[in-house]
Amino acid sequence: MKIIRAKDYKDMSRKAANIISAQVIMKPNCVLGLATGSSPVGTYAQLIDWYNKGDIDFSEVTTINLDEYRGLPREHDQSYWYFMHKNFFDSVNVQPDRIHVPDGSNPDAEAACREYDAIIRNAGGIDLQLLGIGHDGHIGFNEPGQAFELGTHCVDLTKETIEANKRFFNGDESLVPRQAYTMGIKTIMQARKVLMVASGADKAEIIKKAFFGPVTPTVPASILQMHPDFILVGDEAALSLI
Ligand code: F6R
């Protein structure tokens, strides 16, 4: 595990974007596992900036996102498909047929997850997986208590996650989907490199617990301690307890 300390969110984003950029330069046809949420938005903005300056080219890159709400069509403004296009894909040259997000509109959970695992397998696995971390230690939608050995699967969102995400659904909890399709911990652990971004004092406690406490399914991110190439880039506030 390597921990990189950044001053603030902007610095964290630039450092994380540097690592992704190095990956794309070293292997232009690499497979990037991507995340949504507020943590990586600045990283995407930095990559877009470098793309606009001609410093990075995504034309051969394949992207595979971590997760998607079950039951939301792509066009829904809270779908992760929509988020990724708004915050990244619409501004860079990733080829549309190389963009992958779990199909939230497929009601057949088993088929949707099986197909997604096949996509990951056929792409040759993930070279670099970008992650955020939830306050309870979740990664992707792998909530506390999930088995470490799962591939893509359908999960029930916890009360806390529904509560945390309602701000994106006009503050109305009843509008938040109850399930999601997510890469499993096994899939994440099989990525050749894992890069987590964490920002803000509200993440300090869980960062300490996940990376300086025991490895346990009750803190899903703690398994990353066992990953051979895991990099945590955090800002001062998020790393303040370690
Ligand atoms: C996003 C995802 C989630 C988030 C986590 C942190 O695709 O899978 O695990 O990374 O909920 O979210 P933020 O970054 O908004 O604090």
Image (cartoon, helix red, strand yellow):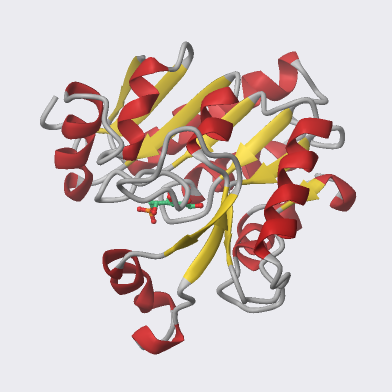
Quadrant in which the C terminus appears: top left
How many numbered discs sit on the rendered protein?
Answer: 0
Picture coordinates of residue 78, whole percent (x, y): 55, 74
Q: Is residue 82 visible?
A: yes
Looking at the image, is 238 positioned above or below residue 92?
A: above
Horizontal placement of 38 versus 105: left or right?
A: left
Image location of residue 108, percent across then percent down = 71, 68
Q: Is residue 48 above or below residue 18?
A: below
The residue closer to the viewer here, 13 or 198, is 198
Q: Position of residue 66 (x, y in %)?
A: 58, 47
Q: Is residue 93 visible?
A: no
x then y, percent, for residue 49: 63, 43
Decide if residue 37 is on the left or right side of residue 64: left
In the depicted structure, whether residue 29 falls above or below residue 104:
above
In this view, which residue lies farthest toward the left?
241
Q: Residue at x 63, y 37 (%)?
A: 33
Report the residue at 77% width, 32% height from top: 121
In the picture, measured across the screen, residue 176 lies left or right of residue 66, that is: left
Tell me the residue at 71%/73% (across/down): 105
What quarter of the picture does the N terminus occupy? top left
Residue 151: image quadrant is top right
Closest to the observer, 18 or 159: 159
Instruction: Tell me where residue 122 sits by quadrant.
Output: top right
Q: Quadrant of residue 6?
A: top left
Left or right of 150: which side holds 106?
right
